[in-house]
Image (spheres, rainbow, N blue to C red):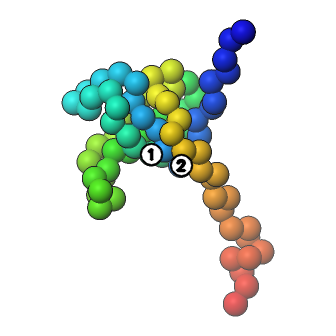
Amino acid sequence: MGSTKTLITENDYVELLRPVERWPAGTRGTAVSDHGASKLVEVSDDQGVMLDLLEVDEVDLELITAYPSVPPPSRAMSLRH
């Protein structure tokens, strides 16, 4: 019986399964943009300062924590005073 890989979406916390550029396997970051089969992953330090942005194939990522994307506020809400 095969397993189903969980889809990674924006805001999810992920781990690299293989080295990417200067970052070793095991490096963790946040998927900040979904490009279909690849994701743009932000690597940051423990203070939240961005260190790098990596374009990574989804098959080379493991989902650590899924976070829902926050929808933009509706126009009606933004017009309230």
Q: Neighbour class for label 1 at 10 Å: few (<14), some, many (≥20)?
A: many
Q: Residues within 10 Å of mark 2 (few under 14, many from 20)?
A: many
Question: Which residue: 53% across, 49% down?
Answer: 11
Instruction: Name the side, left or right, on which 57 lies relative to 53.
Output: right
Q: Position of residue 66 (x, y in %)?
A: 59, 45
State the residue position of label 1: 30
Judge whether residue 57 can be spotted in this image.
Answer: no
Can you identify the residue that label 2 sits on? 11
Q: Judge by depth and name the residue closer to the eye, 35 or 50.
A: 50
Quick check: marks 1 and 2 in contact, CB under 8 Å?
Answer: yes
Name which quarter of the figure residue 15 lies in: top left
Circle 2: residue type: Asn
Residue 34, above or below 60: below
Is there any visible trace of residue 13 in the rendered image? yes
- The image quarter in which residue 79 lies: bottom right
Seen from this angle, which residue lies furthest left? Answer: 22
- Which residue corresponds to the image point at 51% horizontal and 39% vertical from the top-left? 64
